[in-house]
């Protein structure tokens, strides 16, 4: 019988996929996407067949160009050129088959974010380790849903040729209508949120209409519920998933609708572990591969989304009620004129304190947003007073909140981060939309010593479109995203001399390669918190169709530069 061979993707930090021989008795069951067991070093690992061949050879595919990173060492199997190619041990018939579109999505993540495909498979492995459930001949239908929602839900979905952007304070009703329409058509939906609080809020809002067709997917949910969600998706049943980054890697079969809630929120960008993907961008690619409709929702658009709207790459979601934001309740307190002066020990101005006392006297709650991270340990709990970080503001907005104050915004806005102003504008727009929908007005206050900053000009003019357009113009002038792409290469080691030598060596190799990109650094990142000495190189890529080729060249240079014993990390499109 003719021998066959397979490339297998293991959920390990390996450079590429590896070739194994398929024994004749396993050949009928071994197909691309099947999960198999095979020896990797002195261990037995479960991997996924990606390609099958008549003769062993190196696969010329994007994932063979993955770049290794500094991770825990993993055993290396025989290479494709080894005369002693090992055999696959078994085909896991009870485990699900990974579809070709899903494998393409994993390879795209690895290629775009310059990490091994094995790490993407490792992140996704928990979502593909369950016993398969065969599709049932009949499933409960939503046709028995209340009559008042039937007419809305049965309306046909618009075409999926372009993503839609939905700008609205309360977006849940729009989401509900679109999700019901997709589920009635027998399709699946994904609602991607930046954090667990948002997941739970969206889940609770949608639950009365969707009931058992809705799942909340994050690590704090019961394992039984998560397992049922995986089996329902893989079996092809119509349902909706509310989750975060890992929900992108669930076993969808035909996702009709992908919603990215709070698309501008920085927590959509992973910063804790590789791959450092951005949930919004990955959701757009997932929608492209599955030909799904994508809706980006927020109170104010990210600059990337606004840029794509201006160039016709996105469409505005139409036929929604307008809501005029009111700046009447926004109070700007100039602390440069305060006496006594605002300080680290006394961060609240006396005028702010008067309004706090007045709000408490009325029996309402106070929300204080502290933008200076160095002061967090100084705060003590007080009755009816909540302190929060800027990007957790939406966690604490309640109907009884009567006073909201931004503190330490000078530190927040002065951070060496070109996105700081944009993020402050998003925060304010989110609060203004929330306040506009409350029956009882809430007072919004901002303390600052720099009233000339664009953030405060925005508060004075109230023209969101003009302010965001000026930020886009500034980005274009200084060649920042969305007009370019950034890549951060961070090198660290506990010995300062070693860290500096290695980053300088990498910098010299990048300069010699003459890739045509702008390379800045090395410099010490201001937000990196570690005991190691850390240096960073910032690469600015022109936003062209050949950007991926440039990234592959960078990956090759990094791979061929002897950086050990220093560790390094590559962050594409950093937050």
Image (cartoon, rainbow, N blue to C red):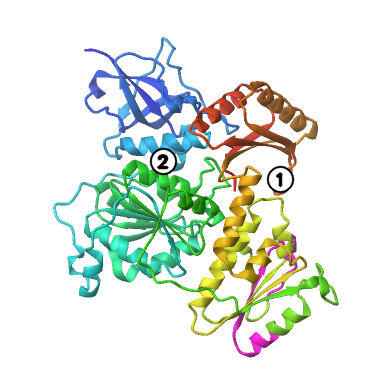
402 above or below 492? below
118 above or below 381? above
> The N terminus lies in which quarter of the figure?
top left
SS at mark 2? helix
Q: Residue at x 78, y 80 (%)?
A: 350
Residue toward you, 307 or 206: 307
Where is residue 174 drawn, in percent x and y? 36, 66
Asked if residue 367 lies in the magenta stretch, the reply is yes
Residue 411, by quadrant, is: bottom right
Asked if residue 323 lies in the magenta stretch, the reply is no
Residue 333: mark: none
Residue toward you, 302 or 35: 302
Residue at the left extreme? Answer: 137
Where is residue 419 drawn, in percent x and y? 63, 53
367 with respect to 188 (left or right): right
**Precedes in sequence: disc 1 or disc 2:** 2
Q: Residue at x 33, y 25 (%)?
A: 51
Residue 47 seen in the current view: yes
Q: Residues within 10 Å of mark 2 (few under 14, many from 20)?
A: some
Q: Residues within 10 Å of mark 1 (few under 14, many from 20)?
A: few
- Magenta stretch, residue numbers: 357-381
Residue 394, by quadrant, is: bottom right
SS at mark 1? loop
Residue highlighted by disc 1: 530
Where is residue 60 drawn, in percent x and y? 41, 20
How many marks can you see? 2
Residue toward you, 26 or 146: 146
Residue at the bottom extreme? Answer: 362
Where is residue 519 drawn, in percent x and y? 68, 33
Residue at the right extreme? Answer: 340
Residue 125: mark: 2
């Amino acid at each position: 019988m003719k021998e066959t061979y397979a490339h297998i993707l293991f959920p390990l930090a390996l450079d590429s996929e590896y070739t194994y021989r398929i024994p004749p008795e396993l050949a009928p069951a071994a197909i691309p996407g099947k999960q198999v067991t095979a020896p990797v070093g002195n261990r037995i690992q479960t991997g996924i067949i990606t390609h099958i061949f008549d003769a062993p050879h190196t696969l010329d595919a994007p994932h063979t160009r993955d770049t290794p990173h500094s991770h825990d060492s993993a055993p290396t199997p025989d290479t494709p050129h080894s005369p002693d190619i090992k055999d696959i041990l078994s085909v896991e018939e009870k485990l699900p088959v990974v579809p070709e579109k899903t494998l393409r999505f994993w390879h795209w993540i690895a290629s775009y974010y310059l990490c091994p495909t094995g790490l993407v498979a490792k992140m996704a492995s928990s979502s593909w380790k369950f016993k398969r459930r065969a599709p049932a001949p009949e499933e409960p239908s939503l046709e028995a849903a209340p009559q008042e929602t039937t007419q809305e839900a049965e309306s046909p979905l618009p075409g999926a040729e372009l993503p839609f952007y939905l700008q609205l304070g309360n977006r849940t009703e729009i989401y509900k209508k679109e999700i019901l329409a997709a589920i009635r058509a027998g399709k699946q939906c994904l609602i991607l949120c930046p954090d667990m609080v948002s997941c739970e809020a969206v889940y609770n809002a949608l639950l009365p209409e969707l009931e058992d067709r809705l799942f909340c997917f994050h690590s704090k949910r019961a394992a039984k519920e998560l397992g049922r969600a995986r089996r329902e998706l893989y079996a092809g049943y119509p349902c909706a998933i509310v989750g975060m980054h890992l929900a992108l890697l669930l076993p969808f079969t035909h996702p009709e609708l992908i919603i990215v809630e709070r698309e501008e929120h920085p927590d959509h960008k992973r910063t804790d572990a590789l791959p450092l993907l951005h949930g919004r961008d990955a959701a757009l690619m997932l929608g492209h591969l599955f030909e799904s409709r994508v809706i980006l929702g927020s109170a104010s658009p990210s600059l990337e989304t606004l840029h794509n709207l201006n160039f016709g790459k996105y469409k505005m979601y139409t036929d929604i009620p307008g809501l005029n934001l009111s700046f009447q309740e926004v109070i700007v307190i100039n602390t440069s004129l305060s006496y006594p002066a605002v300080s680290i020990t006394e961060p609240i101005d006396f005028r702010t304190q008067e309004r706090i006392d007045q709000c408490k006297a009325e029996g309402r709650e106070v929300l204080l947003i502290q933008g200076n991270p160095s002061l967090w340990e100084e705060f003590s709990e007080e009755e009816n007073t909540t302190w929060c970080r800027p990007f957790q503001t939406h966690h604490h907005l309640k109907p009884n909140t009567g006073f909201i104050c931004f503190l330490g915004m000078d530190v927040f806005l002065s951070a060496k981060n070109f996105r700081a102003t944009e993020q402050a504008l998003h925060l304010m727009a989110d609060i203004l939309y929330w306040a506009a929908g409350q029956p009882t007005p809430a007072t919004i206050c901002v303390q600052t010593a720099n009233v000339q900053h664009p953030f405060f000009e925005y508060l004075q003019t109230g023209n969101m479109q003009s302010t965001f357009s000026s930020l886009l113009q500034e980005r274009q002038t200084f060649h920042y995203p969305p007009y370019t792409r950034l890549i951060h290469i961070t090198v660290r080691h506990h010995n300062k001399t070693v860290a500096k030598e290695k980053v300088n060596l990498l910098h010299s190799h990048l300069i010699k390669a003459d890739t045509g990109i702008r390379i800045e650094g090395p410099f010490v990142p201001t937000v990196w918190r570690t005991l190691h000495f850390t240096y960073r190189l910032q690469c600015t890529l022109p936003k062209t169709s050949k950007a991926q080729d440039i990234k592959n060249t960078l990956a090759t240079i990094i791979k061929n530069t002897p950086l050990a014993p220093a560790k390094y990390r590559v962050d594409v499109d950093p937050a």
